[in-house]
Image (tube, rainbow, N blue to C red):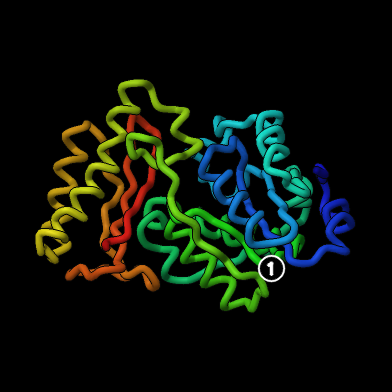
Amino acid sequence: MELCKTISEIRQWLQDWDNIGFVPTMGYLHAGHLSLVKTARKETEHVVVSIYVNPSQFAPNEDLASYPRDLTRDLKLLQELNVDAIFFPDDREMYPRGFKTWIKVDKITQILCGKSRPTHFQGVTTIVSKLLNIIEPEKMFMGEKDFQQLVVLKQMAQDLNFKTEIVGCPIIREKDGLAMSSRNKFLSSQNRKNALCLYHSLQKAQEMFDEGIRDSHKIIRTMTKIIERSNCKIDYIEAVNPFTLEHQDHLQKGDRVLLAVFIDGTRLIDNREIR
């Protein structure tokens, strides 16, 4: 496994490779990240993982400085999965002095997470476009937990004619249902229990749909009560079309229910496909 810290190093390493699978991460890896690596190993000949905490997708009041990092642990986990190369750049490498270019996807970045984090997706699309240009993978694997991000990046790749296919992979959960996230580390034992309200509310949405309820507003009201009982602050709960992210008044199979919740200052997201 090769650890590359500069663009020239990773390009040199990859120059003779074909059929590359790529997994972009911010490190502090958990089983969700590792599931993406395993899928990439099955579907492509070579696997590259990036580890980079991207400052441009954090607002000034967010948790960039405290975002968990453990490179030694991450490298050990990736070596066990036979990853071929790690790209581990620093800020000077990715945003050199004089950097002035940003990638912006319109409309679908201004709703849901983009409403409360207005600069977030510009940072995501810019860094991912840079990584795709550097690594040039056949496929990039991303989890469906960040569902809006997945839709935004698919739109960007389509609009800008990237050759890379972006593959969405299932959400990986803890045994009790909590979606795996690097930010779960910030939760106290009590808040960890409270965080299960996200999963329970999404389960309730499916149960109501199974009972024949299609009115998304009624479902969202019930989900809101479940979450508020756990003393959590709701950023949003929305029922959306899975391709356009447009609000759905009348739920259909295949639609998604997305939510973002603050638990004592830690912001967690989750979603569920209605089946």
Q: Quadrant of the C terminus?
A: bottom left
According to the image, label 1 marks what residue?
138
Residue 35: x and y in percent read 55, 47
Residue displayed at 61% across by 47% down? 25
Q: Quadrant of the N terminus?
A: top right
Residue 246: x and y in percent read 31, 70
The residue most toward the top is: 189
Q: Is residue 46 above or below residue 160?
A: above
Residue 55: x and y in percent read 61, 45
Residue 260: x and y in percent read 34, 47
In this orientation, which residue lies closer to the viewer: 184 or 1?
1
87 horizontally vs 265: left or right: right
Judging from the image, what secondary structure is the residue with disc 1 in? loop
63 horizontally vs 131: left or right: left
Which kind of residue does numbered mark 1 sit on? Answer: Glu
- Dividing the picture into quadrants, the one containing residue 128 is bottom right
- Dividing the picture into quadrants, the one containing residue 26 is top right
Q: Is residue 59 above or below residue 21?
A: above
Residue displayed at 36% across by 68% down? 242
In this orientation, which residue lies closer to the viewer: 242 or 130?
242
